């Protein structure tokens, strides 16, 4: 897969609005995706200000090594299972997991929000961002890393040469709450 082909599709390509309502059409194929904010005012300070400073509305770039339907639609947009974007946007919007919810769990990083908060985050995701994606027969993590390095999406921490510290602070706080015994 050529970098330019994927780049053109997920950076400059068609974007899907109301991704939760309209995402059922996302196929079970490998690929890459990007998530963009439509209205900067939907994000709290300092995240909206940082996007203005960076002159972009790009929130996140990801890869689906098996199924875009599962990774993007079910996990990132609806949190049916662990998903980095969902946890990040939930933290950015001010939600926190229940205290002690990670105690005795094997993975001490994949915090979850309660059902009421999860539903509120899903509703926010259906209204505010739009998504682009590109199907391909094989995926390559190095291509995802190059896209993140070039475009520096606000909610990508790993492989981002300009990670946004307030994001790390919010996610660290969420993990601390979830790890703290009740």
Image: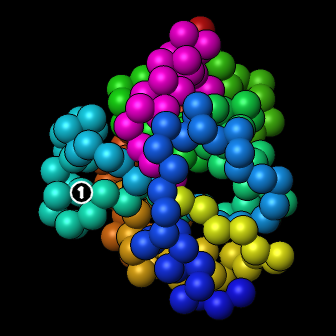
Residue 12, percent from left and from top: 43, 72
Q: Residue at x 73, y 79 (%)?
A: 140
Residue 142, percent from left and from top: 65, 82
Q: Residue at x 80, y 36 (%)?
A: 106
Total marks in image: 1
Q: Residue at x 31, y 57 (%)?
A: 57
Q: Residues within 10 Å of mark 1 (few under 14, many from 20)?
A: some
Q: Is residue 71 visible?
A: no
Quarter holding the N terminus? bottom right
**Relative horizontal placement of residue 135, taking residue 144 as reference (left or right):** right
Residue 14, percent from left and from top: 49, 63
Q: Residue at x 52, y 79 (%)?
A: 7
Q: Which residue is labeled 1 in the image?
A: 51
Dividing the picture into quadrants, the one containing residue 73 is: top right
Residue 65, percent from left and from top: 79, 64
**Relative horizontal placement of residue 163, taking residue 53 as reference (left or right):** right
The residue range painted magenta reads: 111-131
Q: Is residue 169 visible?
A: yes
In reply to whether residue 158 is colored magenta, the answer given is: no
99 to 141, vertically: above or below: above
């Amino acid at each position: 897969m050529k970098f330019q082909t994927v780049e053109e599709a997920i950076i400059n390509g068609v974007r899907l609005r109301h991704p939760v309502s309209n995402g059922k059409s996302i196929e079970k194929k490998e690929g890459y995706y990007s998530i963009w904010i439509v209205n900067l005012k939907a994000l709290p300070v300092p995240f909206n200000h940082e996007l203005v400073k960076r002159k972009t509305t790009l929130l996140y770039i990801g890869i689906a090594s098996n199924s875009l339907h599962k990774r993007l639609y079910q996990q990132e947009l609806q949190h049916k299972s662990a998903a980095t974007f969902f946890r990040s946007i939930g933290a950015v919007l001010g939600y926190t997991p229940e205290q002690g919810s990670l105690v005795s769990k094997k993975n001490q990083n994949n915090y979850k929000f309660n059902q009421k908060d999860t539903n509120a985050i899903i509703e926010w995701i259906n209204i505010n961002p739009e998504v682009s994606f590109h199907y391909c027969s094989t995926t390559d993590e190095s291509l995802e890393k190059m896209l993140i390095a070039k475009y520096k999406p606000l909610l990508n921490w790993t492989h981002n040469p300009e990670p946004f510290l307030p994001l790390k602070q919010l996610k660290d706080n969420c993990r601390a709450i979830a790890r703290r015994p009740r």
